Amino acid sequence: MNLHSCKDAGSNSSAHRPTDRIMKKKIIIQTGKGKLKLKKSKELVGLKLSKKQAKVEEKKGVEKKILDHLGGFKLVALKEKGAALDKALDSLRSEKDVKIGTHVYIAEGSSRPMIPTGVLYITFEEGVSKEEQALVLDEYKLKLLEQRSDSEVTARVTPQSPNPVKVASSMQELALIRRAEPDLDTLVDEYDEDINLPTDPLLADQWYFNNRGIVPSAGYAIRKGADARIVKAWERLGNMGSSKITIAVIDNGFDPNHPDLSAKIFRPYDLWTRSSRLTQGDPRFTHGTSVASIALAAANGQGIVGVAPRARFMPVSGTSFSLQATEEMFDYCIKNGADIISCSWGTTDPAYDLSPIKEAAIAKAARQGRNGKGCVILFAVGNDDLDYISYYAAHPDVIAVAACTSQDTIASYSNRGPEVWVCAPSNGDWPLIAARASWDQGTSLRGPGEFRYWIDGKNRGNRYKHFGGTSGATPLVAGVVALMLSANPELTAREVKEILKTTADKIGPAWEYTNGHSRKYGYGRVNADRAVAEAIRRKATKPQPQPQPQPHVPTSTDKGKSKLYRLDVNKQKAQGWGVQMGVFKEFSNVLTQAEIWRKQFNQPLIIYITSIQGETAFKLVLGRFDSVDQARALLKQVKATGQQGFLRKLSDFAT
């Protein structure tokens, strides 16, 4: 890393500033795994009106309304098409009751309309300071919405900002930014499609699917809306998931004859018998039957319904602390086609922290399973009311699941910690309902008779019982993942984890969240509907391969472009103060901008050469002063011209 003073640089090229780059004709943005090429629709636009009751189809120039709600806009077709559409949209924007008018985009290879919501998800390179981040946001006139982490922010365009799609496309060329993705909404299902809900008699009591504010069989009041949006996710999919998705449940006490599980079993394995014969009948082991049913109980009209009732069930029996057994259970899941691995067990005993061998076994499944897309692995955080979670759940490749209640509060027993990823409904107020093994003797803690199985003593069927803990919350999220993979089987394990994070609902007090994360709730309560919608969106906007840009080689036909530069370089001590103005990837842009700022402010330009994510980057600092007050005066002068910068202590660049 070097620090140089650039005293003079001559060029007749135009300034390479972010606001100049947004004018390029091709619009290529980052989304999902790669890049997406967009073009403007020739007939559709999105409008937001100031009066909710106003009829958009009555606006001058509107041919017809297409949709009432898409990304917060009304989607309409205009009478003017093609090249005339821009002028027609500008005319609508000038009307008093039109708050916002936006272009609609079409992805290459798709016919679905896409509307930018105005929000951008921006990830800066590691080491980019908050001041440098603010400089970028100011350059595009963006409003910061949330500082999600040291490097991740969400921002919204303002009336002074360019179009959010063009902003994102432009930002991708900045050395400071790893990725910039505009929030786009598109059609994700058929709006006139409905789904016939299962007829299973206990579905009405499964409040965690669709909380209507009461448990019908008990007349017990709960908080309306405190659920995981399972029914809405089914409606969005138009079905209840795919039979091609396999959920492996690693546990003990599976009843293969239970009517909600028997027809779904796929490649079972028992670590104790070393065969497909599952260990049964021991009253100490009944847990696995209940856990599995939360995720995938069949919709057969007999009792409860699982979150993903069409998913295949791979029971892996015989949980163990053994290193060999841990490797064996996860390797079995990889080799036999498990898409999801749900584990409602673990340990918080410091004496039994994970060894590197166990960490590697879990990491291998998360990265090599599903033919390289990775098995999605979920672990319960534990029920010990501790300020740290199960060592298994804390593994970085795992989705750590906490428990919340039917009142949308954290379950008091649920462990807490920075690794908690999401929470999901379970007991703590009113419990879940789960399948019970035929040899399940219930719990003496609840008393005699039906109280062994039901907290209110009311029998709801001999093959079922009340259930809860983080053991119940974890398979619920596993079922949500199965619905996501049903919608988009190409999602990687990392993408699934990211989607669960960005689509979760924040519950509990706002002050408990820091950069969008809570030690109790993780990134919030899982929202199956939003998660499935995002999975569908990513499938619909699957990027097309883009040609790699070729470097420009100057030729004699480059009229008006300078081919010569005069550069005087002196070593600059890392002392004093200046005003940082920008960061660039291309050195030719450094030369161009340095000349402009040198002439405009009559100050030397200092270049700090560094590396961001393995690529060379150039940070430009204007001026070099002994006192911060002198640098502050220059900063005031810079801002008076409408440009942005911030004070920079040159010793920050000392290596």
Image (cartoon, helix red, strand yellow):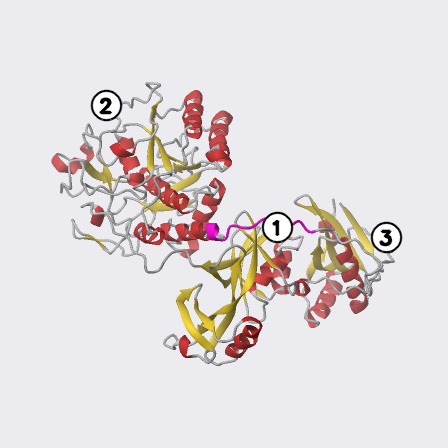
Q: Which residue is mark 2?
A: 282
Left or right: 27 with respect to 17?
left
The stretch in magenta equals: 538-549
Give how far across and how far down residue 503 sits, in percent: 43, 52
Where does the C terminus fall, quadrant-wise?
Answer: top right
Q: Residue at left 40%, top 24%?
A: 321
Mark 2: amino acid:
Asp
Give how far across and how far down residue 182 sits, in percent: 53, 58
Residue 381, image quadrant: top left
Q: Which residue is mark 3?
A: 570
Q: Residue at left 53%, top 75%?
A: 89
Kindly report the distance in space between the C-alpha atoms of the residues bearing marks 2 and 1.
58 Å
Disc 3 crowd, CA 10 A, few/some/many (<14, 14-19, 20+): few
Left or right: 138 with respect to 102?
right
Which comes before the other along the chain, label 2 or label 1?
A: 2
Give how far across and how far down residue 376 sits, in percent: 43, 38
